[in-house]
Amino acid sequence: MKPSTFTPATIDAYVDAFPAHVKSRLQKLRATIRRAAPQASERISYRMPTFYLDGNLVHFAGYEHHIGFYPTPSGIEAFRDALTAYKGAKGSVQFPHDEPLPLDLVAQIVKFRVSENVQRKGKGRKS
C-alpha cells in the first residue's frame, strides 16, 4: 500500500501507487464520481483524491483492507439507512475490498453533495 508520507501530485499518481486489485476499484470509484459530478474538478487535498465544486465535494482513499469514501457528515447522514452495512464515522464510510463497491449509492451521494454545494453557494450571493 502507499506509504503514509506519500503526497501525489495528481489523482492518477495516487491511484497508480496501489496494487492492481485496489487500483481497479479506485478507478471505478473515480469514474462513478466523475459521471455523477461532471462539472467538478479533481485535486489532491489532505493527501487524498478530492472532487471539488464550490468547495470540497467528496474525497476517497485506498487502504489495505478497504476504500475510504468521505462525503462530509451531511452526505453520510442523508444516506444513513443505505450505509448501515458498512463501517463508518461522522463523515466517512469504508467499502471493504472483499465486497462489491456500491457504485449506484456512491453516485446518489455525490449528486446529493453537488446539490448541497451549489445550493450553499447560491445562498451566499447577494441579489
Image: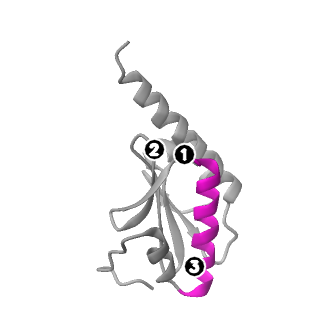
Q: Nearer the viewer, residue 123 or 112?
A: 123
Q: Residue 113: x, y in percent?
A: 52, 42
Q: Amino acid at mark 1?
A: Gln
Q: Residue at x 65, y 53 (%)?
A: 35
- Residue 87 vertical placement versus 6 (above, below): above
Q: CA distance from mark 2 to mark 1?
A: 7 Å
Q: What kind of element bears circle 3?
A: helix
Task: Please report the bounds of the magenta region as a residue range.
Answer: 19-39
Circles 3, 1 touching at the beta carbon (< 8 Å): no
Viewed as shown, does residue 77 lie left or right of 107? left
Q: Is residue 108 left or right of residue 65?
A: right
Q: CA distance from mark 2 to mark 3?
A: 24 Å
Q: Main secondary structure of the magenta part?
A: helix
Q: Amino acid at mark 3?
A: Lys
Residue 84 visible to the viewer? no
Q: Is residue 99 visible?
A: yes
Instruction: List x then y, in percent, for residue 77.
Output: 51, 43
Disc on the earlier residue, 2 or 1? 1
- Check residue 23 in the rendering and tell me which mark sits there, or answer none: 3
